[in-house]
Amino acid sequence: MVKPKQVGHLVINVSDVAASTKFYTEILGFQIAVQRPTATFLTCGEIHHDLALFQADEHSPETRKGNIGLNHFAVQVEDFDSLRDLYHTLLEHDVKVDRTTDHGMTGSVYFEDPDGNGIEFYYDKFDTAEEGLAEMRREGRENTVLVID
C-alpha cells in the first residue's frame, strides 16, 4: 500500500483570477511564482508552488458552505504573533473572520476567500510533531475560542 509523504499543493477554481490573485498576495502574503491569463501559481517562498488559482468556467455554480467538496484548507504560520498579524490584516481589509479556535495542538483563524472557499491559518503550539499528535489524541481534548487580543 502507498504511504503518502505529505500533501503537495492545492489547486482551486475561482470566479476571477485577478481578484483572487490580489486577495492571496496582498492580504494573505503568498508570492506569485508564475502568472498566466487564466491561472496564477502561488508560493510560500520555499517550493515551485503551494497553491494555484484557475479561472472557473463562467457557468460554474457558486461555492456553498456545507456542500460536498472542500471544507477548508489550512496554511501554517510561524507563531502566535504571525497569526495575530494575519487576524488584524483580515479585519483591516474587511474580511469576515468566521471563528478563532484553540485546538490544543494548534491555534487557528478561519475565514473565506472571495469565492467562499474556507481557509484556516494556524500555528503549532508544540515544538515537535509527536507532542502535537499526543495532544490531538488526548482523551477529553476540546476546542475552545482562541483569544487573539
Image (tube, rainbow, N blue to C red):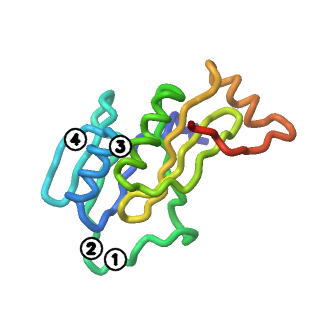
The answer to the question of whether label 2 and label 1 lie on touching residues, with beta carbons closer than 8 A, is yes
In front of the other: 103 or 74: 103
Q: Is residue 86 left or right of residue 101?
A: left
Q: How far apart are labels 3 and 1 at the CA level?
A: 25 Å
In terms of secondary structure, where does tag 1 sit?
loop
Question: Which residue is identified by label 2?
Answer: 57
| Disc assigned to residue 28 | 3
Q: Residue drawn at (62%, 18%), measured in percent from left and top? A: 127
Within 10 angstroms of label 3, few (less than 14), some, or many (20 or more) residues?
some
Q: CA distance from mark 4 to mark 1?
A: 25 Å
Comparing 87 with 126, the one in front is 87
Give the side of residue 77 with respect to residue 101, left or right. Answer: left
Q: Position of residue 55 (x, y in %)?
A: 25, 64
Per the model, the C-alpha gap separating discs 4 and 3 is 12 Å
**Neighbour class for label 2 at 10 Å: few (<14), some, many (≥20)?**
few
According to the picture, the residue beneath numbered tag 1 turns out to be 60
Tell me the amino acid under the disc marked 4: Ile
Q: From the image, state whether disc 3 or disc 1 is nearer to you.
A: 3
CB within 8 Å, label 4 to label 3: no
Under mark 2, the amino acid is: Asp
* Mark found first going from the N terminus, 3 or 1: 3
* Camera-nearest residue between 79 and 53: 79
Give above or below for 64 relative to 3: below
Q: Disc 4 designates what residue?
A: 32
